Amino acid sequence: MRNGKNSLAPLEEQMAWFSEECRRAGLKLTHQRLEIYREIASCRDHPSVETVYQRIRSRIPTISLDTVYRALANFESLGFVSRVHTIQNQAHYDAVREHHHHLVCDKCGHIMDFDWQALDETPAPDAIKGWGRIDNTKVTLQGVCASCLKAGR
């Protein structure tokens, strides 16, 4: 949820986009890949590879954890999903294609999407202008969420 709105496109639109992009990239559209992407696209909780694997195993009992790892690595390299880094160094995945940022709770691991228009519109500092080309300006803010603060964690 971003700014109180559901930021996920309808699932059928996301799946049609994914199918078309796989064809364009020359990536075979297997049942396992479809289910892995469907899982990421249909949830808002930024699941880890292990979480995706556990959820899909109920639908595809023969799927392996390695298949999920490889599929998500392919999806990330092709830009179909993005990886959200956490302090625990466990990768979490996001299929929201619209530009956004993340808040990560260092205590419970909850990840939330948010928009920050002022940051997005701010030009790069002079000190880094000669570095090269900036392709992405996603920001991850880390701290402790209100629920954990209230619980005294």
Image: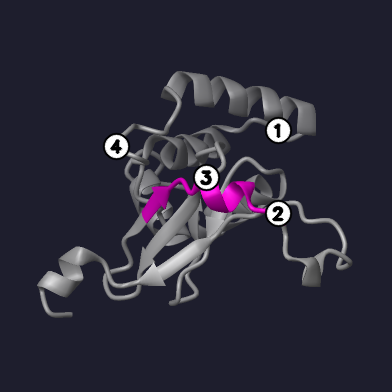
Is tag 3's residue or tag 2's residue first in the polypeptide sequence?
3
- What residue range appears in magenta? 112-123
Side of 42 where 153 appears, left or right: left
Q: Amino acid at mark 4?
A: Gly
Q: For this rendering, which residue is in front, 22 or 151?
A: 151
> Which residue of the protein is positioned furthest toward the bottom in this rendering?
153
Marks 1 and 2 sit apart, C-alpha to C-alpha, by 40 Å
Identify the residue at horizontal 64%, vertical 55% (top origin): 137
- Tag 3 near tag 4, CB within 8 Å: no
Residue 148 locus on image (x, y percent): 19, 71
Q: Is residue 152 above or below residue 66?
A: below
Residue picked out by circle 4: 4
Residue picked out by circle 1: 28
- Tag 1 near tag 3, CB within 8 Å: no
* Quadrant housing the N terminus: top left
Give the crowd class for mark 3: few <14, some 14-19, many >=20 residues within 10 Å: few
Q: Quadrant of residue 143?
A: bottom left
Is tag 1's residue or tag 2's residue first in the polypeptide sequence?
1
Q: Nearer the viewer, mark 1 or mark 2?
A: 2
Give the crowd class for mark 4: few <14, some 14-19, many >=20 residues within 10 Å: few
Give SS at disc 1: loop
